[in-house]
Image: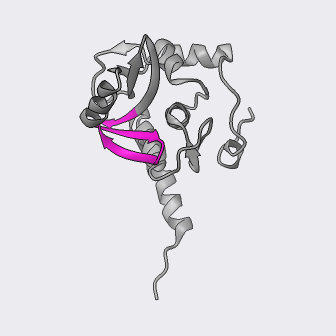
Amino acid sequence: MMVIKWDAIFKNEQRQFEKMSEDEKFIYALLLQYGSPYEWGQENPEGSDCSGSVCLALFMATGLLVRTTADDLFKRVFTIQSPKPGTIRAAFFIKNGVATHVAGLVDNETVLNAQEGGAKVRNLDRICSWFWNQGHSSAVRGLDRGALEKLCRDGARYGLDGNFGKYFETGA
């Protein structure tokens, strides 16, 4: 009987991850969360909410740790309009001027959507249509890395969930 050697598989994953660009790491981190349950206020591979899934992927891709809301990400971090493929991007769903939901882009047509029911890979057009029917507009924005760095320096973030430390070291 053959069994999976998880240590060997994850050692290989680590080597591959280290060779990736920031955009590729962001996508990888989003997909790592596939199937995780929706957990309000969390940002870890076991479960997260919409902004937590994006903040976790940003941290894994850039090393910059911020925990904030979908609206704050929209207004302060993902400010590049008409972003090019090959950059870190997210889709935002806006109602009355407030981004109420965010999903990280995996490619031009696909997002990792952390919502009730768990984190799933979804078609961007279908998600946009659903939110449109709920009175939202949508926007795809690119990451302004300088703005992310500034937000991290300013310390503007909510507290990290208790499970975060199981997966990441937060010391200097």
Task: Name the quadrant containing residue 139.
Answer: top left
Pinpoint residue 67: horizontal percent, then vertical percent: 61, 27
Q: Which residue lies furthest to the right in this view?
A: 171
Placement of 81 over or under 12, stated as above or below: above
Give the main secondary structure of the magenta stretch.
strand
The colour mode here is: one colour
Is 34 on the left-hand or right-hand side of 125? right
Can residue 108 be seen here? The reply is no
Q: Residue at the location (48% across, 44% down)?
A: 18
Q: Residue at the location (41% across, 39% down)?
A: 113
Placement of 2 over or under 7, stated as above or below: below
Q: Residue at the location (49% across, 74% down)?
A: 4
Task: Name the quadrant containing residue 88.
Answer: top left
Pinpoint residue 1: horizontal percent, then vertical percent: 46, 89
Is 127 on the left-hand or right-hand side of 67? left
Pinpoint residue 8: horizontal percent, then vertical percent: 52, 66
Is 109 on the left-hand or right-hand side of 166? left
Pinpoint residue 118: horizontal percent, then vertical percent: 47, 48
Which residues make up the magenta segment? Answer: 104-123
